[in-house]
Amino acid sequence: MSGRDPATAPRRTDLGWLRHRSLRPAPGSSAARRTTAPAPPAPAPAPAPSPAPVRPPSADLDLSAPAPAPSPPAPSSSLDLSAPSAPAPTPSPSLDLSAPSEPVPPASSGPAGLLDLFPEAPAAAPPAPAAGRRRAQQPARPVPRLAAGGRVILTPQDPTVTLNRLQSGIGALTVEAVCSPAVGDVSLGALYELTDGTSSIVERLRGLAAGPPGSPTPVLRADREEFEQLVVDLHQSRDLRRVLVYATSESGRELDWGGTLITRTFGGARLELPLDLGVHRGPVALLSVYVIDGEFVLRAETEKIAGAVRDVARAYGYERITWADDRTPVV
């Protein structure tokens, strides 16, 4: 069969259809399977979950685990001026022995550059210490000693002196009121208290020259040489607790006080107390003597007392003395 010459052959009008027709897939190919395979059936809708049975409130023991804590709110980058709402507590009438729920962590405060319109109040500053505490405690001034053969003058600024054990336990302690006749009729006396509780007075012009009264070895004696004086027997110093030396007018009249009260002890030591007290009617408390740990501590009093000797005893705590009148004790 001979072909026709293409140059003389008639024009084909079906070539355009042949160029644009779709190819039919071959049997058994994957494209055929995709177009011919039936679609799988749609899954059946899941049944709605049945609601959990509501448990009526009961006072039974609840051992269930605690409810999970709510999740913290997410941080926000915008300005939030509202306060976070707190979760409402769920009342439970049953006894809950489960472990306490974890505390909810605080929400993040966001970036540091955000405006904070509610800053926390600054912590209160600790109270300043009291003025009295800032001051260092002043050290106590040591009580001066009376040196052997020495001389000390008692003043309102330095009213106290201490005798050593030799001066407090050997010989005698002599107290003498050195006053001129211009002062008047000075009478020297003493209130005393022993360790056994015995308490009374010695005063020569009252007829009580020794104490205790009737003792063969008195602890105190009232005497007079050139001036009125009192003598303490230091061999019996362990029996003595305290003494108060006073002076008064024998006639009870007003005196213009002056002179010096001189105390002498073992070794020639001397203690002087000026009696420049001015005009006064009544007794004057002059010198206190206390026995502390075997040593005598002497203190200037120089206090004018209104009244009589009984008022001096009351002012200085000699309450164990009973009185016949305001100047005479019961012995």
Image (cartoon, rainbow, N blue to C red):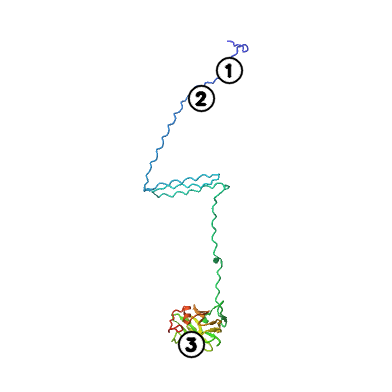
Q: Is residue 187 above or below residue 123?
A: below
Judged left or right of residue 316, residue 50 is: left
Is disc 3 in contact with disc 2, using a CB cutoff of under 8 Å? no
Camera-nearest label, 3 or 2: 3
What is the secondary structure assignment of the residue under circle 2?
helix
Query: What is the distance, in whole Å, between disc 3 and disc 2 at their CAs?
Result: 154 Å
Q: Looking at the picture, how far across and down is residue 118, in whole percent?
A: 54, 50
Type of amino acid under label 3: Leu
Instruction: Check the picture and name the quadrant holding the C terminus.
Output: bottom left
Query: What is the distance, in whole Å, between disc 2 and disc 1 at their CAs?
Result: 26 Å
Q: Which mark is residue 277?
A: none
Q: Is residue 4 above or below residue 233?
A: above
Q: Nearer the viewer, residue 211 or 156?
A: 156
What is the secondary structure assignment of the residue under circle 1?
helix
Crowding near the residue tagged with mark 2, few <14, some 14–19, many ≥20 C-alpha atoms within 10 Å = few
What residue did someone put label 3 on?
A: 205
Q: Looking at the picture, how far across and down is residue 60, in whole percent?
A: 36, 48
First along the sequence among labels 3 and 1: 1
Q: Residue furthest bottom?
A: 225
Type of amino acid under label 2: Ala
Q: Nearer the viewer, residue 124 or 281?
A: 281
Is disc 3 in contact with disc 1, using a CB cutoff of under 8 Å? no
Camera-nearest label, 2 or 1: 1
What residue did someone put label 1 on?
A: 16
Q: Which mark is residue 31?
A: 2
Can you tell which quarter of the image residue 200 is in? bottom left
Type of amino acid under label 1: Gly
Camera-nearest label, 3 or 1: 3
First along the sequence among labels 2 and 1: 1
Q: Looking at the picture, how far across and down is residue 23, in whole percent?
A: 54, 21
Query: What is the distance, in whole Å, between disc 3 and disc 1 at their CAs?
Result: 170 Å
What is the secondary structure assignment of the residue under circle 3?
helix
